[in-house]
Image (tube, helix red, strand yellow):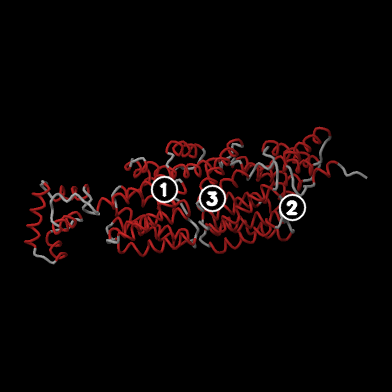
Amino acid sequence: MAADPSERARKSPERPDWKAEYAQLSALDRRTALEPADLERLGAVAYLAGHESGSIDANTRAHNLALERGDTRQAARSAFWIAFTFIGARESTRAAGWAARARRLLEESRHDCVECGYVLLPQALEQVAANDLTGAEATFTAAERLGERFADADLTSLARQGRGRALIALGRQHEGVALFDEVMVAVTAGEVTPIVSGVVYCSVISACFELLDMRRAQEWTEALNDWCEAQPGLVPYRGECLTHRAEILHLRGRWVEALDEARRACDALASAKHVGHGMAAYALAELYRLRGEIELADAAYRLAGEHGRTPHPGLALLRLAQGQTEAARAAIERVMAEPARGRQRANVLMAGVEILLAAGDTSAARRAADELKTLAGSLDSAWVRAMADTADGAVLLGDARARQALAPLTGALTCWRDLHAPYEEARVRTLLGRACRSLGDADGARTEWDAAARVFGEFGAAPALAEVEALRREDTASKHPETGGLTSREVEVLRLIARGKTNREIAGELAISEKTVARHVSNIFIKLDVPTRAAATAYAFTHRLAP
């Protein structure tokens, strides 16, 4: 006997084509009156095929039909999926209304069923939004227990990943990450339905990026990509998958592939009018900025801002690259004053160090570097530790303490290498080269800069490559400086003047009398035709007589 068409429609093939199944179920819906369970299936397939309004319509019809028949449990279940869809669309008010209806139906009928756990999930999300993290963790736990009692893998997985995120927000990172690992076992084993799989994948990967746990982020991103590729016609999650892949490829130094994935993500999320469009645009803007494609970067940052993703700190760094140092400083100081956590805060602080050093405010850069070091201590992330060491070394170098900068910079270099982050490694080599030059190690400086230049050239990182080439030219010019007729001793004195040393301090450093220093200073003023120590300092920097 042939299988009933609605039964065939409810079953998912091993390689589902969601658009094709949506067309099939929609045709069946037009020919015959579907039962609530079939309408629920139609709603799920519509969601996976990218038809959110069709999903809401099907589940609304299932809800109303179940109410007419007195099946309050089915009605509550359909109401939950409507709320779920509105949550994904960031329509919190409508989501709250449907969730409240689902809870009321179950409470009035006094059901003890798995749906009682599902309706706890929107409540937990409301608690998170109200910053009641302890309450949210308790609510997620209650939902998880109901999922386990009724052997419902979907509910258990949704509640478990929610509890993991709440625990992380409460500072219990190890517990939260352990829950992520556990829930991903169920997802990758195919124990949960496609909608729940996609939600869990995106939530866990987002949390791993937030924690800068790049090993897990990369592993789960690749798993999500394989999962998406196995489902033709899948619309949700694919754009987020491409964005995450672009970020991972960017960090691993595969910039050409990263650009391609970021562009595809922007196209996919723009056509779906998805809120993740801003994240995809920001990922694309970062790549354009690092490649020196200023106009494209500017446009992409603005697109990110239009879609709800702050364009900073990337846009502030872009202004710095354009030579607009004060604009960059004003932007980054404003952003640094705003609350942020995890990855976002780390990126803001790192950009703050770079911009403030460029603006000559070493003290403010030191405060940002110290906060980054504190953040690294609170997060179990090798990535943040490498950022903190890089920032520390850069500030020490900016404070003319090259010898002290060597230890954190060497540590950062090792860490970036272990993390397979070649661009960041090359940036540290640029700083190490400057430290070597300040310490008189010309060969060491040249070695570091040559290594950095090879990486920047391979990636197409034009601004970073230009910086290294300028350092190499400067190094060459310093070997033949315009001394203005100064003797070697007078050049030594001038360099110490440029460092802000007094005559007494210069005498102590060179082991000569203060009277001799005064004579040298007088000779320097006469030979260079300058009236003050400030003018002599300017000459020293302009003519590369001082580092």
Using residue 324 as the reference point, say whether residue 381 is left or right of it. right
Disc 2 marks a residue whose amino acid type is Arg
* Residue holding disc 1: 338
* Residue holding disc 2: 110
Query: Looking at the image, is mark 3 or mark 1 earlier in the sequence?
Result: 3
Q: Which mark is residue 499?
A: none
Where 174 sits versus 158, above or below?
Answer: below
Query: Looking at the image, is mark 2 or mark 1 earlier in the sequence?
Result: 2
Q: How crowded is mark 2: few (under 14 residues within 10 Å), some or many (20 or more)?
A: few
Query: Looking at the image, is mark 3 or mark 2 earlier in the sequence?
Result: 2
Quadrant location of residue 262?
Answer: top right
Quadrant location of residue 521?
Answer: bottom left
Disc 3 marks a residue whose amino acid type is Leu
Q: Which residue is drawn at 57% across and 58% down?
A: 216
Q: Is mark 1 on a helix, strand or loop?
A: loop
* Residue holding disc 3: 249
Q: Residue at x 52, y 59 (%)?
A: 170
The x and y percentages for residue 171 are 51, 61
Where 453 sits versus 233, above or below?
Answer: below
Q: Residue at x 67, y 39 (%)?
A: 50
Q: Which of marks 3 and 1 is in front?
A: 3
The x and y percentages for residue 388 are 41, 59
Q: Residue furthest top?
A: 30
Using residue 29 as the reference point, say whether residue 327 is left or right of it. left
